[in-house]
Amino acid sequence: MESSRALICCIIFLSFFCLLCCAEEEVNLSINGAISIAETDDNFICATLDWWPETKCDYNQCPWGKAGILNLDLGNKILANAIKAFSPLRIRIGGSLQDQVLYKVGTSAPKCPHFKRIENGLFGFSKGCLDMDRWDNMNKLFQETGAKITFGLNALMGRKKSNKNDILMVGNWNPKNALDFMKYTASKGYKIDSYEQGNELCGNGVSARIEAEQYGRDIIVLKKLVQELYPDPATQPKVLGPAGFYDKQWFNTFLKTSGPNVVDGLTHHIYNLGAGVDRTLINKIQDPKFLDQVAQTYKEISTSIKLFGPWSGAWVGEAGGAYNSGGKEVSHSFVDGFWYLDQLGMTSTFNHKVFCRQSLIGGNYGLLNTTTFIPNPDYYGALLWHRLMGKNVLSASHNGSPYLRIYSHCSKKTVSKFSVFCSLAGISVLIINMSNSTTFDVKVADEYKDENQREEYHLTPKDGDILSDVLLLNGTPLKLTESSDIPEMNPQLVDSTSPIKVAPDSIVFATLKGFRASACA
């Protein structure tokens, strides 16, 4: 009798435990395919190659290794294959030390120093130098892989410190060294998609700053140089700036000073998770209320453009989530995808054209591992976004938990061997389930009628550990092939009449080819 009673109690307890930990919730998803609410660039995904030397250290760790521009192994096969897989990947050359970089060309940079640790230097480093042999080798990689390049120029040449403020830099920009570099680049036929003026010198600055009016005047000079060097509008690089943290008054003044059709991309930086050493970092990444806070910045920068620079477009020019090289155990693991992919979705709804990750390789937040070059989970998330999510953004809403994040775009118009009707672009959705206990059965609203199979890509961490750096696609670990190629990323085909089942702590991309959205025609 006692044993029967114990068995019944055990069954009741397990049932209750399952209800708590294995909950399943039905969610109705409504997507308005009639109009596009925003539009991204065709090459929305971007990643930075930074200047940091091996001696860049934070919180008793030095995670950059040989990932910096001046010591990166440009012949690494994994690196080349990782870039090539995007066909093309937008790469930004820039970062904190770019305003101390001299270009070894012409007569304005007779010496070519290495970056060295110095006490009073910007970010604790001396000036450094890019020689043209290195630049030639970099462009060989870019040409072989088809990368689209944004180059961040040194904006501090010719300036000096203000007598009244330690970090305020005054005086006009001296473009001589930059012009020599740009002339050399153009003469070699190297394709540059855009030039960016300076790094984190706007607003209050970081280690240095420039007043908005001065910055506006200087970027007019840069625009004229670009127009002279590249007279053909079809091949003329865009001009970007100011590449720093958003300050409403500063950005508005900058746009008003620079005037119409000068700034093609208004670039701002996002490190909304705080310091990489923060022990609550993993909690912030899984907190939808915290992640939503940065939406105000996206909204305000869109307003600045609408009021003072409608000829320009909003770009997230650099975003690492957590600053100072990211979180050691967090920023390269599966859980970081909750932050990264959510920010891709959020910024796209606020009409941002480009989202540039810090970084392609280096620190704790690189898409590639600093030492092995092996892709981290966020690399595969970025690649799926690039391949599936088109530039037209659709309105998506649901009646589920705030821990369920859903974004929808017109599908990329590419032919898939899994699609029956390749002429139907349809839509793609990104679904992020931050809940660790609830499975969501997501049903698309009734206007979706499709007799075809749906393509689904389910991303989960190995062994269910959200701090794992091994990513499973539809239950299979993603790993490089024997020839160091990026593995095929094939969907599972699902009956389109069934709901999309999104497991706890998982991310799903789904392509609905039969969704007839007039905005995607």
Image: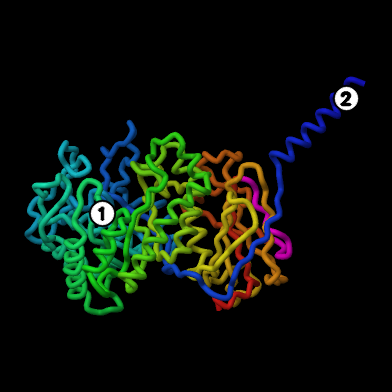
Q: Secondary structure at mark 2?
A: helix
Residue at 30% from the left image edge and 70% from the top image edge = 308
The location of residue 421, given as percent across then percent down, is 64, 75
Q: Quadrant of residue 311?
A: bottom left
Foreground of the two, 517 or 145: 517
Identify the residue under disc 1. 203
Disc 1 to disc 2, C-alpha distance? 70 Å
Name the foreground residue: 152 vs 482. Answer: 152
User: Label 1 is placed on what type of residue?
Assistant: Gly
Which quarter shows the N terminus? top right
Where on the picture, by quarter, is residue 296? bottom left
Q: Place residue 9 in its image quadrant.
A: top right
Eyeballing the image, is 411 above or below 59? below
Extreme-right residue of the structure: 1
Q: Which residue is mark 2?
A: 5
Residue at position x 13%, y 56% in the image: 157
Determine whether, in the image, residue 507 is placed left or right of residue 266. right
